[in-house]
Image: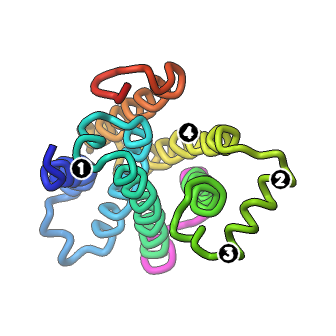
Amino acid sequence: MNILFFVLIYLIAISIPGLLYLASLGGIALLATDPHAVSVVLGTTAFAVFSTQFLLAAKPRIALSALGTKGLLSFHGTMAIIALILAIVHKTLKEDVLGFPDDTVQTGFGKAAAAIFFIAIVLAAFLMANTFWMRFSILKGFKQRVYAAFSLSYPRMRIIHNITVIGGVLILFHVLLASTSDFSANPLGSLWVAGWMLFCLGAYGRYRLVGRKGSVMGIAR
């Protein structure tokens, strides 16, 4: 598959929730006048990227064909960082600028999810893959010492990385408890975020349970 076509499909997928939520609020024109609408788009886009991370982790053939294994891993890592940045900007705009409360159950789910994803990103960057950071001898030595001290291995680190599933569930609760996800006002949006996260988690769960030889809906063998 052509890489540009894959990127187009990916961008459409992560844009859908923002468009659905904007439609329920009054339309895309609100982005020019309403900071709350901007915060909603940032938050739902962050959610969509985090959700799709589970699908990418399952190595679907469409992604492998376009990017290759190394390219997919690099894209997966890059998008995790972008999602976290979007989430932080969303939180800052909504709570620090617009004055929404930061001590509710809903925000608690969001903070917990962000913390889990942050930890997972740090672990992946410094203790799992041979990333850019491993070019620095001090960081490479740190990784080796940590592995030796805790008897770690890449498979074990991969299991630890699975804590992101908890983060996925928490961020789903965070989005569904938002006022903009009220089913009576935004049925398509709330159904989409729930359905997409469950689909992505299901694809990832299938991949992990069956192993790399498994196949489901285009998941790589």
Q: How many marks?
A: 4
Of the pair 158 and 202, the residue shown nearer to us: 158
Q: Are marks 3 and 2 in contact (CB under 8 Å)?
A: no
Question: Which circle marks residue 142 in the picture?
Answer: none
Q: Residues within 10 Å of mark 4 (few under 14, many from 20)?
A: some
Q: Which mark is residue 137?
A: 3
Report the amino acid beneath label 3: Ser
Q: Marks 1 and 4: in contact by CB < 8 Å?
A: no
Point out the tag, 4 or 2, that comes first from the N-terminus: 2
The crowd level at tag 1 (other Cα within 10 Å; few <14, some 14-19, many 20+) is some
Q: Is residue 102 magenta?
A: yes
The answer to whether residue 203 shows anywhere in this view is yes
Q: Disc 4 or disc 3, which is closer to the eye?
A: 3
Q: Nearer the viewer, residue 146 or 96?
A: 146
Report the Cα–Cα distance between label 1 and label 3: 35 Å
Q: Which residue is mark 2?
A: 148
Residue 142 position (above or below residue 205): below
In three-dimensional space, the C-alpha distance between marks 4 and 2, rounded to whole angstroms, equals: 27 Å
Q: Upstream in the sequence, badge 3 or badge 2?
A: 3
What are the residue bounds of the magenta stretch?
94-107
Left or right relative to 177: residue 114? right
Residue appearing at x 42%, y 20% in the figure: 214
**Any mark on residue 10, and which?**
1
The residue under the point 53% across, 39% down is: 169
Q: Residue 191 at x, y = what percent?
A: 31, 34
Which residue in the structure is indicated by mark 4? Answer: 165
Image spot of residue 83 (x, y percent): 42, 61
